[in-house]
Amino acid sequence: MFALLLAAEHLLLPPLETAEGPGSAPASPALYAGIAIKLLYLVPYFIVGHDVIRKCFIGIKNKQLFDESFLMTLATVGAFGCGEFEEAVAVMLFYQVGEFFQSYAVGKSRGAISDLMDIAPEFANRENEDGSTEVIEPDDIEVGDILIVKPGERIPTDALVVEGHGLINTAALTGESVPREVKEGESVISGCINGDTLLKVQAVKEYDDSTVMQILELVENAASRKSETESFITRFAKYYTPIVVIAAVALAFIPPLISGNFTAEFSKWLLRACTFLVISCPCALVISVPLAFFGGIGAASKEGVLVKGSNFLEQMSMLDTIVTDKTGTLTEGKFSVSYMEAAGEMDTDELIRYAAAAESGSTHPIASAITEACKKPYPPSKIKDTQVQAGGGVKAIVGRDEIIVGKKSYLEEQGIETEDTLADAAGTHCYVARNGKYIGTIVVSDKPKANAKEAISAMLKAGVKHVVMLTGDSESVASSVASELGITDYRAELLPQDKVNVAEEMLSVIKASTKGKGKLAFIGDGINDAPVLSIADVGIAMGSLGSDAAIEAADVVIMDDNLTRIPKVMKIASRTIGISRMNIVFALFVKFACLILGAAGIANMWVAVFADVGVAVICILNSMRMLIKDNEQLKVQN
Ligand code: ADP
Ligand code: MG
């Protein structure tokens, strides 16, 4: 307000000496021409800055006083007040150029991420009942529609193949470069690209519910879950701006008051205060830090990894411990029967028939191995009262007999003694009992995933201190898998609830030993591991492409089963944090230096414009690196 009055005074009243000078004539025409020219500066000022001024007033009305528009308006009005007309207009102009550049950069990065992901289908070919086809918008697909996907076209929505078979490229969604084979009856997900053959598919989901839309939404919403670094910047701006304004007011008034000659000194200090305000604009940080995270999440998506929020990306760079499930995570999760031994008069054919009958009601991977190994299964009508004990085994009535299949401790709990004639056979031992009597052992085995060992050593190299395997399986299987994969730490024979307890215990140990800086990630298959997934700092679900449950429960979803993506995402995360920190340090350093120079009267408005707009542009360019070449580098390194 004061500045406005001062500006008015400058414009309307002729300088004092002229007005009151001895014997001066009434103001000369030249003087009025000067005032008119100065008034003319208001025209470009308002043209360039009207929306900033408007935003400033809206801010004042909404009681959100201290934003950038407020700082800029105050500073430029102040500059007018000091008679620095060119500077006032120039500051507004450069500020607007900077703003334009910023919105361009942000828009460009969003565009870059969708291009990067490039998964949205543009159209669909629908086959009508009369056999004709028509091209429709993906939005118009209805469940049950028959769609034709020609070679090279994108599958428009999640669907079932009804005719044709061929290879589809899932790279854009999973990062997996090897095409996947599909045939009649198999499901395909939207966004994949069809290979060389024509596929006829039937839509099972509308476009809005399709995998592509889920992924795009996830990536867009990810930005709303703020990382610590981002919330720090928001909090910082909240306190920083008012402090700067108060400092500027003090700078305008206190030195002239102390000098004793207020009127003479005031306009000089007011100008310094305005310079100070321009420099202090925090926009470089407010925009560039979220942009870096946005880029990081985009880079991870390109690797086939969905990170559900900036906070999770940030935590991926701080992992102290990775806890993993065994079956289906470190191992293939596809068991097969490797040995059998029947006790007493029982023969192995009969043994497996009984076991398979009991297992027919279980969905455990072990159950499918046993049922597949049985050539003459009991008819389902003979099997009843199946009871599944998670992490233990299964019990059922087969014919007139009670059959139990499970791990040693599960049988012992029910008072059944087991024998260990196959003790040396590697694999998971399933003990079988009939009517409370041990009748034999079936050994099933599963093999570690091909790249699991490599993935674990890459995690350790990327900075994780411990990799711990948790399993419900026996000590001997756990130790052989662990040593094969180079895992030093494992816990075996855990019930599902024990896994949660172990994870909680580890969380508190890590918290205490790293003062809250180290994070724990849990990798599981996303369905039966949901409790542990949710208590871990970062819950990572594996290979659950298209499974809604896993996408819901986890914080990070790896689209294919590939564990080696985790260390890659850790690198992307560290890079993101590195770039954000670099921006914070650089911006604060330049601003702080310029603030001191501005207060001392050494830096003028032009330096101030650089400190604001220039720094913002540099920080934004730095953040945009996250989107461009670094991803390629990551690929080459690994
Ligand atoms: P993991 O921790 O490896 O995912 P689970 O917790 O699912 O394993 O199961 C732990 C152990 O319980 C298995 O290794 C197996 O010995 C036994 N078990 C669980 N379910 C069954 C079943 N349906 N049939 C036989 N054994 C089972
Ligand atoms: Mg499991």
Image (spheres, grey):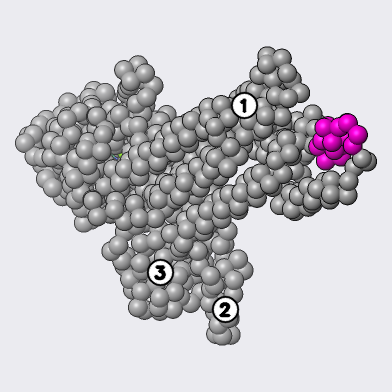
Tag 1: amino acid: Val
Tag 3: amino acid: Ile
Are dots 3 and 2 in contact, CB under 8 Å? no
Sequence-earlier tag: 2 or 1: 2
181 relative position to 90: left or right? left
- Nearest the viewer among 552 and 63 is 63
Q: Which residues are magenta?
A: 10-24
Sequence-earlier tag: 1 or 3: 3
- Nearest the viewer among 177 and 274 is 274
Q: Nearer the viewer, mark 2 or mark 1?
A: 1
Are dots 1 and 3 in contact, CB under 8 Å? no
- On screen, residue 178 above or below 394: below
523 relative position to 289: left or right? left
Percent position of residue 548, x then y: 47, 49
Q: Which residue is mark 2?
A: 135
10 Å crowding of disc 1: few (<14), some (14-19), many (20+): many
For the residues marked 3 and 2, what is the alpha-carbon distance in whole angstroms?
A: 17 Å
For the residues marked 1 and 3, what is the alpha-carbon distance in whole angstroms?
A: 54 Å
Percent position of residue 230, x then y: 51, 35
10 Å crowding of disc 2: few (<14), some (14-19), many (20+): few
For the residues marked 2 and 1, what is the alpha-carbon distance in whole angstroms?
A: 59 Å
Q: Nearer the viewer, mark 1 or mark 3?
A: 1
Q: Which residue is mark 3?
A: 193
